[in-house]
Image (cartoon, rainbow, N blue to C red):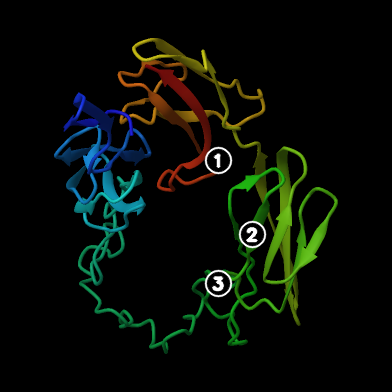
Amino acid sequence: MPGCHAFRIMWGIFGIIVIIGSFGCVPKFTLEVVIDPVEAGQVSSNPSQDKYRQGAKVMLDAEPSQGYQFQKWAGDHEGADSSTTITVEKNMLVTAHFMLLDSHEGEGEPEEGEVTEGETGEGEGEAIEGEVAEGEGEAEEGEVAEGEGEGEPTEGEPIEGEGEYLLQPAFSWEPAWIGQDVSFDASASQNAETYTWDFGDGTSGSGETVVHQFNVIGVFAVTLTVSDASGEILLSHDVAVELTPVAGFSVAPETAYALQEFLFTADLQSPDTQPVSAYLWNFGDGNISTIPSPVHTYEDAGTYEVRLRLFYKHSQSLDTSPSQQVTAAHTVIAHA
């Protein structure tokens, strides 16, 4: 184990015998913390060290940036408390997920029972919820008063005289990457009996939920048709199909001596690839870097596994959704 050496001195018939080796060395491990998204906050560790002895307790404290809030820990440790304690038993990778706050939350929404400006004329007084102003007559809940709003039922309201809810299509989908399964879900549709899909690439499907793969990048108009005994209604959304980044890197030289420099360079991506939002290098000795082409020096001789993580997001992902990532690994040797 690099940096873990001991020796024993023994007396023999011919003098002193020195035996060099490892005698009872306690293993040490790295604790790598990733922040997602990278600008959403910071994480402090106590104690803060490059490596920890096996069984060491480390307290992590997540502090969100302005406009974000802490969501959860994931990876080799899971939990929802922003302050947590980890027991180091191996080389560990922990991700702190943050989510974007809704800046409009709670704004402009009158409380139940309040009347917004302009709803009641001067001197008309306040009407209790469910009551009808004098002279308009009394309408049962769900009925439409005479001459008001006829022919314009809102979403989910019954059509006058029929007592049936409107047929209404709706669907959502996961971020679409080329060559990967994409799930489409129309369970939010109302009163639909059949579901038919046109994926905009010459293929179709049926069912409330379907899975589809796109074989080329681009934007496709995906159309859902729902129907019942009264007819059918169509709904279309533009679905962007994108290319994921490919993790890879080179190192020069691959073999050198301790205290010599190694140059690490992330591979260039295709112009059609979704942009990389962040880089995270782990050099295998407790040190990290977040630039595309770092230079690193190993203080101790040994064999090290270097890992590169690329973080990226789909253009149609929500701001609050976590970044996706791909990883590459490479072995380097530092001689004594």
| Figure check: 75 above or below 272 | below
Report the disc number at residue 60. none
- 264 left or right of 21? right
- Mark 2 vs mark 1, CA separation in Å: 15 Å
- 198 left or right of 103? right
Disc 2 element: strand
Report the disc number at residue 183. 2
The image position of residue 241, as x and y in percent, is: 67, 42
Kind of residue at badge 2: Ser
The image position of residue 204, as x and y in percent, is: 81, 59
**Picture quadrant where residue 128 is located:** bottom left
Residue placed under numbered mark 3 in the picture: 153
Q: Earlier in the sequence, mark 1 or mark 3?
A: 3
Kind of residue at badge 1: His
Residue lying farthest to the top in this orientation:
260
The image position of residue 177, as x and y in percent, is: 65, 44
Q: Earlier in the sequence, mark 2 or mark 1?
A: 2
The crowd level at tag 2 (other Cα within 10 Å; few <14, some 14-19, many 20+) is: some
- Mark 1 vs mark 3, CA separation in Å: 37 Å
Would you say residue 82 is visible in this rendering?
Answer: no
- Mark 2 vs mark 3, CA separation in Å: 32 Å
Q: Nearer the viewer, mark 1 or mark 3?
A: 1
| Figure check: 328 above or below 230 | above
Q: Where, quadrant-wise, is the N terminus in this rendering? A: top left
Residue placed under numbered mark 1 in the picture: 314
Q: Where, quadrant-wise, is the C terminus in this rendering? A: top left
Q: Earlier in the sequence, mark 2 or mark 3?
A: 3
| Figure check: 288 above or below 322 | above
The crowd level at tag 1 (other Cα within 10 Å; few <14, some 14-19, many 20+) is: many
